[in-house]
Image (cartoon, rainbow, N blue to C red):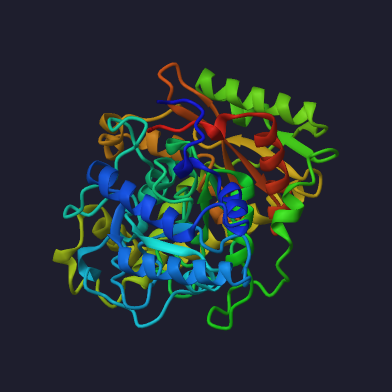
Amino acid sequence: MNALSAAPHYLELSELAERLKTRAVSPVGITHALLDRISRLDRSLNAFALVTADDAIEQAQIAEAEIMGGHYRGPLHGVPLAVKDLCWSGGHPTAAGMSIHQHFCPSEDSTVVHRLKKAGAILLGKLQLTEGAYSDHHPSITPPKNPWNPDYWPGISSSGPGAATAAGLCYGAIASDTGGSIRWPSAANGVTGLKPTWGRVSRYGVFELAASLDHIGPMARSARDCALILAAIAGSDPKDPTAMLDPVPDFPEQAGQGVRGLRIGVDPAWNGHDVDPAVQAVLAQAAEVFHSLGALIMEVTFPDVGQTIADWAPNCAVEAAVAHEATYPVRKAEYGQVLASVLDNGRALSGMEYQKILLRRLELRGRVAALFGTIDLLLTPVHPFGPLSLEMIQTLGEQPDLIFKLQRYTCPFNMTGSPTITLPGGVTDAGLPIAFQLVAAHMGEPALLRAGTAFQSATGWHRRHPLA
């Protein structure tokens, strides 16, 4: 328990891929093993909204025949993964955490699901999330549990992807992040999460929360694993005109290039004000590791984000109201209280107020872009405190200061569209994970992956696991 583990279900994706490629491991065998593990453990974890066992076994059989026949598609071939249940899967329900969509069965795959299948991945099923990917689970859903301690928060909205990846129920997952929804569950569950640049990954066939804030990306056991998944899902898409046209870099190859010469900015005031000592210690230790590996640690001043954090909620609310226009308010009774309140707020905001938010957002984006003219990466907390208990989270609506703190280091980078990586970097006295975050300029995923891979090559925090 809570120790380094070499159990097959806790192999890094890259390690499993090598064993699959050399036929030391069977896609069918490893898929059966994970389906058995899901059957045993997910009764209490509730990470999966839907397990597609028959499809997974069929995909594994095809992958095995292809690999045995010398037709190896690449590092995801035969690897069991799962996707957040807001990504369409043709022929399977995609509920987005909502009772209103529980019978919605798309006729086609989302682009990310299509690309995973094209890469030969085995899809085990759909992972649970909060209602509409906002902040609260629908009353009809049993929320996922944190596998480290069920009395602690598993993160939102990608609670299922975080719990499943941490517990060894899949080798990685596709998640989304609108205000922190890859980073919070990655931190809470002790896994690695990559929020790509907005538009780096197609959003076609993914339920919207807020179109200009939504980012689609991987959660996995390591930065290198995230690089392998991102390489498969990134790129332009004629079905999503907002997806970037830029060529997709060789993320896995670039991930191994180390950090020598990279400039990592640290804002002592922003990282230190009202931040728990345990989190500050993790940041300091991470900076020391990067320095020892040849990175340049530079003191910077990050733009004030107080107004940005205040602006995030109404910005998200307006866009969410548009996304739900066909069903809200006409079917309001089927919505949970929290999401309904958000949609009401979005519908009530005036055009003048919204335009002011957009102008302030553009200004922040420019200031952050200027900062990244002087550094390659920014080192920050994910949130300014250690793991949160469920008891504390249940009082969130009564504590606006706590909500502000929770969003301080996450939602600004949805407002700017900046890519980030979340890395496990320490533990509490009780053994619960603490993470930190690196941020890069737009299109800066290679630098994030270089730094994440270098850090994890020098440390072992990402190799700690919660269950046997």
Judge left or right: residue 215 versus residue 452. Answer: left
Figure check: 296 above or below 98: above
Seen at 29% across and 40% down, the residue is 145
Seen at 39% across and 72% down, the residue is 88
- Answer yes or no: is residue 356 visible: no
* Quarter that holds the N terminus: top left
* Quarter that holds the C terminus: top left
Figure check: 393 above or below 231: above
Q: Considering depth in this image, is 300 or 96 the residue closer to the camera?
A: 96
Q: Considering depth in this image, is 39 or 364 the residue closer to the camera?
A: 39
Q: How many marks?
A: 0
Q: Considering depth in this image, is 230 or 324 the residue closer to the camera?
A: 230
Judge left or right: residue 21 versus residue 58. Answer: right
Seen at 72% across and 27% down, the residue is 289
Spot occupied by residue 309 in the image (x, y as percentages of width and height): 49, 46
Spot occupied by residue 21 in the image (x, y as percentages of width and height): 61, 58
Spot occupied by residue 383 in the image (x, y as percentages of width and height): 49, 35
Judge left or right: residue 395 versus residue 307. Answer: left
Seen at 74% across and 31% down, the residue is 290
